């Protein structure tokens, strides 16, 4: 994975700091160590390195910038080997292939972000609490698409989108939950779902 000269300096600083102190530096310490005047610049470099699979962060922990071990880093544009197909019904013959898959196959060149799902409103679409949805940033959506919608300027929700005259119906995929029906002017589309990631611990 190619990184810029400045990103390499950030990685080298992190490695040296952790080796010397036994814990990760703060953004302010990185800025001071590299002679950067803006913590926002540090944040940009850290975010880009995280996207490239070189760093890992826990948002609810201070000093949480961790270098990903060399052998665990995802290479070749976040590709992983596609070793074949697995039966979820009747068994099929096991056969390995030489293919790979990558997040790039899903997101392409679109502006995409991820959100962690909380709640069960989309469970019948097999989107469960704790899953991550990959969302294309857009302000428009077609009828029936799964969207991230901002409702009344205050609440965001993951639902299927159905414009109905002067109203919008945000439909859950859970028979136990009622749809959200609001005036169209009170709904702002923030993105549409491209895919779902699930991590088993």
Image (spheres, rainbow, N blue to C red):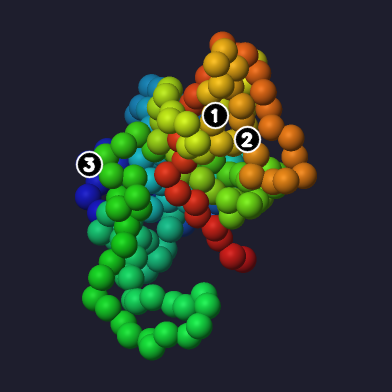
Q: Residues within 10 Å of mark 3 (few under 14, many from 20)?
A: few
- Tag nearer the camera, 3 or 1: 1
Dot 3 or dot 1, earlier in sequence: 3
**Residue projecting furthest to the right:** 176
Residue 187, above or below 119: above
Marks 1/2: CA–CA distance: 7 Å
**Residue projecting furthest to the bottom:** 93
Residue 197, above or below 28: below
Q: Are marks 3 and 2 in contact (CB under 8 Å)?
A: no
User: Viewed as shown, does residue 59 lie left or right of 83?
Assistant: right
x, y percent for residue 141? 43, 28
- Tag nearer the camera, 3 or 2: 2
Q: Are marks 3 and 1 in contact (CB under 8 Å)?
A: no
| Label drawn at residue 162 | 1
Quadrant hosting residue 179 = top right
Of residues 154 and 49, which is closer to you in this image?
Answer: 154
**Residue projecting furthest to the front:** 165
Residue wearing tag 2: 171
Residue wearing tag 3: 5
Q: Residue at x 31, y 37 (%)?
A: 110
User: Viewed as shown, does residue 76 lie left or right of 117?
Assistant: left
């Amino acid at each position: 994975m190619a990184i810029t000269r400045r990103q390499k300096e950030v990685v080298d600083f992190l490695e040296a700091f952790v080796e010397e102190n036994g814990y990760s530096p703060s953004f302010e310490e990185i800025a001071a160590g590299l002679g950067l005047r803006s913590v926002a610049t540090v944040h940009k470099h850290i975010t880009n390195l995280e996207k490239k699979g070189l760093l890992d962060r826990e948002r609810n922990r201070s000093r949480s910038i961790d270098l990903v071990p060399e052998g665990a880093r995802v290479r070749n544009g976040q590709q992983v080997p596609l070793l074949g197909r697995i039966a979820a019904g009747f068994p099929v013959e096991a056969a390995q292939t030489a293919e790979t898959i990558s997040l790039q196959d899903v997101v392409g060149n679109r502006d995409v972000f991820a959100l962690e799902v909380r709640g069960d409103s989309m469970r019948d679409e097999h989107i469960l609490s704790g899953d991550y949805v990959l969302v294309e940033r857009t302000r428009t959506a077609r009828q029936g698409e799964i969207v991230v919608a901002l409702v009344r300027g205050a609440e965001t929700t993951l639902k299927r989108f159905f414009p109905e005259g002067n109203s919008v119906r945000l439909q859950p995929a859970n028979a136990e939950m009622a749809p959200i029906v609001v005036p169209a002017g009170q709904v702002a589309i923030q993105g549409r779902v491209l895919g779902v990631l699930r991590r088993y611990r």
